[in-house]
Image: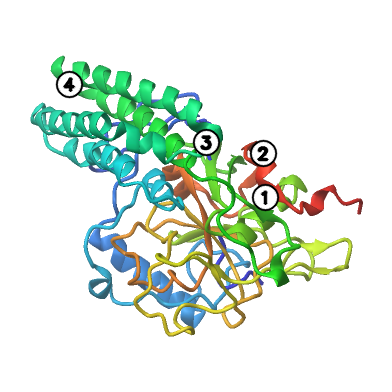
Amino acid sequence: MAAALASPTCCCCRRPSLRPSAGRRGRRPVARCALPSSEKRNSFSWKECAISAALSAGLITGAPTSGWSAHASPLEPVIPDVSVLISGPPIKDPGALLRYALPIDNKAVREVQKPLEDITDSLKIAGVRALDSVERNVRQASRALSNGRNLILGGLAESKRANGEELLDKLAVGLDELQRIVEDRNRDAVAPKQKELLQYVGTVEEDMVDGFPYEVPEEYSSMPLLKGRATVDMKVKIKDNPNLEDCVFRIVLDGYNAPVTAGNFLDLVERKFYDGMEIQRSDGFVVQTGDPEGPAEGFIDPSTGKVRTIPLELMVNGDKAPVYGETLEELGRYKAQTKLPFNAFGTMAMARDEFDDNSASSQIFWLLKESELTPSNANILDGRYAVFGYVTDNEDYLADLKVGDVIESIQVVSGLDNLANPSYKIVG
């Protein structure tokens, strides 16, 4: 039996042809879907939301649903009425969520970041009129960078100051290039340049973090801990799908806000635990895997012969360190918002037994529903399950995965040096 809920990044998705979706540019036949993904899946319609609510009701009652695997558990929570969940436009972009989740407090760099992110909304305006709005965004970001450069540099860790200066120079040049793109009315070139500039901003912000900002509680301090961030690529082989052969998803793991959870997963990645494992649940709500063959529902630590479990780990906005072992509801923190919310398509989290907060081991899931259905601080997931990363590239293809598709490999791209206490290095 899989845990109550289970829980990526880049590269290649081979698709001979792809079905069109309302509101999306028609997909051209391609041999491979390469990183970065250039086309995104639309937000779910109200009809889809209603279907999802019906599906989740089936979960709570254990009613059979078409296409579910034997691994699907009847213990997943039911989704409340959709109208209760709509509470405004949350941040849905995984890159933006990761930037805002960094443990920094530098207003100057945020004033550069925000108008660059607003370009996404500007591009929703029809035709070339969008470029007028983009131009205002670019000018605002350029002005913020010029006025705040010294404050941004002052916020950098001393050892990373030189790199920060170089990145800010590249950012300034890139903003000038984006201004020329707008003046040339080249709408198609805006989004790629925006992504490049936000990558510079994100790296500068990461360089503002000087060391790991807090001590993990002693009872968990000997576990594998990710003290920073790491990036992995997950390659999935698709079975019985004429439209999709394989896909590689890029995932950013956030150890600043979930060091125990992200460290546990990265340690299992290095053990090749997930390599060759099938997708075990895919029902339109989540994609889930991590339940090994045999009676155990998690990773058996060869040094103990027992399933290795980790505590529920939640970082709350305004807190200096995560809380452990209890949901926010159990703590009475009903209005608290988690630093890593279930806002993005492809939010990655740990599965666990519904009635045991500290039973997570190896089962992971990716949320498919976007935040109109599960907005931050107004759903049945935030504060109950530990988010520890986001799929940042090719996340829209998660919805194409089916039960029986095989994870060929998960490989670390960067950040392995941030893993403390790695158990995979221990013989046995």
| Mark 2 or 3: the one toward you | 3
What secondary structure is marked by label 4?
helix
The image quadrant where one finds the C terminus is: bottom right
Alpha-carbon span between mark 1 and mark 3: 28 Å
| Mark 1 or 3: the one toward you | 3
Alpha-carbon span between mark 4 and mark 1: 41 Å
Of the numbered discs 4 and 3, the one sitting upstream in the chain is: 3
Neighbor class of circle 1 (other Cα within 10 Å; few <14, some 14-19, many 20+) is many
| Mark 4 or 3: the one toward you | 3
Amino acid marked by disc 4 = Val
What secondary structure is marked by label 2?
strand
| Circle 3 residue | 158
Front in this rendered view, residue 152 or 355: 152
| Circle 1 residue | 266
What secondary structure is marked by label 1?
helix
Amino acid marked by disc 2 = Gln
| Circle 4 residue | 182
Residue 19 visible (yes or no): no
Amino acid marked by disc 1 = Leu
In percent of width and height, residue 157 lies at: 51, 39
Alpha-carbon span between mark 4 and mark 3: 36 Å
Residue 78 visible (yes or no): yes
Of the numbered discs 2 and 1, the one sitting upstream in the chain is: 1
| Circle 2 residue | 411
Amino acid marked by disc 3 = Glu
Q: Residue at x 91, y 51 (%)?
A: 427
